[in-house]
Amino acid sequence: MATERVPGALSVATGVWVGVGSRDEPDHLSGVSHFLEHLLFKGTDTRSAQELARGVDRLGGDFNAFTAKEYTAYYCRLPARHHQFCVELLGDVLTRPALRDDDVHGERQVILEELAMDDDSPDDVAHRRFAAALFHGHPLGRDPAGDRDHVLAISPDDVREFFAQHYRAEAMVVTAAGPLGHDEMLAEIERCFAGVARGGALPTRTAPSAPGTGIAVDDDSEQVHIVMGNRSLARNHPRREALDVVNHVFGGGLSSRLFEEIREQRGLAYAVYSGVSSYADSGVFQMYAGTQPEHADEVHGLMTSELQRLVAEGITDEELEVAVGYLTGSFELGLEDTGARMARNGGLLLTTGTVRPIDEQVARWAAVDQTAVRDVIDDVFTAEPITVTVGPTD
């Protein structure tokens, strides 16, 4: 576990990070991590779903969760004077969930509605199709929410067995941030999580093989949604900070090349950006733009030409300075919230085994130079990108 004392804060944020996500599911149980995440809010042996919700609302707090490709996270944030309830709540749902048959069948329909909602967002469809193409035939290409057929097939016993196998002490990190001391928080966590099952380990993972190919999906929408990109760097790669810098210059901010060229200069898109994601053994670089059908070829051409210019010319010293300033400054500003500090500590401890000091992370971005930039451009941006489009194909 990890705690961080934040003097003067008025809240305590507590989270539990479980080292299992959508890439760790058997093929026939795709979506079970997300299904289980929903079900932990349906009640425990001692609290009903309504009691869970009312308990947090009564104190003005926030209680939520999310499922990612390599972990599932549950978190609660309350005024500091109610920190004990926060820890008790998480301990209850993580160690004693009811997982009743009726709740599984009832929540199944909620998840199907969530999937239908996502399918009504063509930009979401484009990103999901891109991931499936980039990690063709590999669990990293799955949507963490699953798909309709698998969600319909998952049984109550499947959910209970998945919980018993993966929700164990060796695969969990409990983290908290707020004005309280470590010993006080540790005592509360030990008391409330005493019932967590022991044994087990983090899942064994297989690295992805070669990427697939792009695809054009016909959709009756007002825009064509274009996603382009390729494989990138794993989480612990030594050039990870240089990749952050290059991504910010290329499409990561309001001063980026994609934003300036496609939106500001030509007015061809409202949303246009690039981003990077990292996993234990791989990563993603992708860029996105949404534009009207008559501009789709032009926008795709501009995205391609900007990528080619990046490979040929690199970035300027001024762009490097702006990117480092943005990354370090936004990182520090983001940590003024106890929830952000809790989430950073939990995610790092679970995925890397350590929590990098804030000053060290800032120094790593500040140390990026033109040599590191050139190396990461050659590593990541020279491969032929995969392109996925969703929208009117004519």
Image: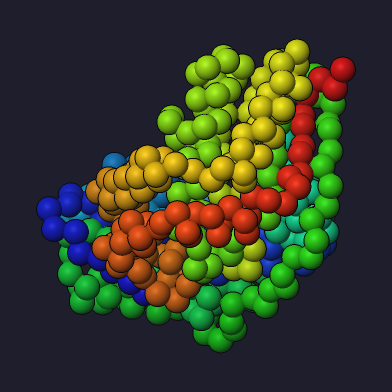
Position of residue 83 relative to residue 331, above or below, is below
Percent of width and height locating residue 135 = 76, 56
Indicate how the structure is coloured in the image. Answer: rainbow
Quadrant where the N terminus is found in the figure: bottom left
Q: Is residue 25 left or right of residue 319?
A: right
Seen at 37% across and 40% down, the residue is 318
Quadrant where the image shows the C terminus: top right
Q: Is residue 93 left or right of residue 118?
A: left
Q: Residue furthest right?
A: 394
Q: Nearer the viewer, residue 232 or 250?
A: 250
Residue 284 visible within the image: no
Q: Is residue 367 above or below residue 350?
A: above
Q: Residue furthest left?
A: 8
Number of marks: 0
Q: Quadrant of residue 99?
A: bottom right
Residue 190 horizontal/vertical position (percent): 33, 78
Instruction: Where is residue 292? Give x, y as percent.
Output: 70, 15
Q: Position of residue 357 (x, y in %)?
A: 30, 67
Nearest the camera: 31 or 328?
328
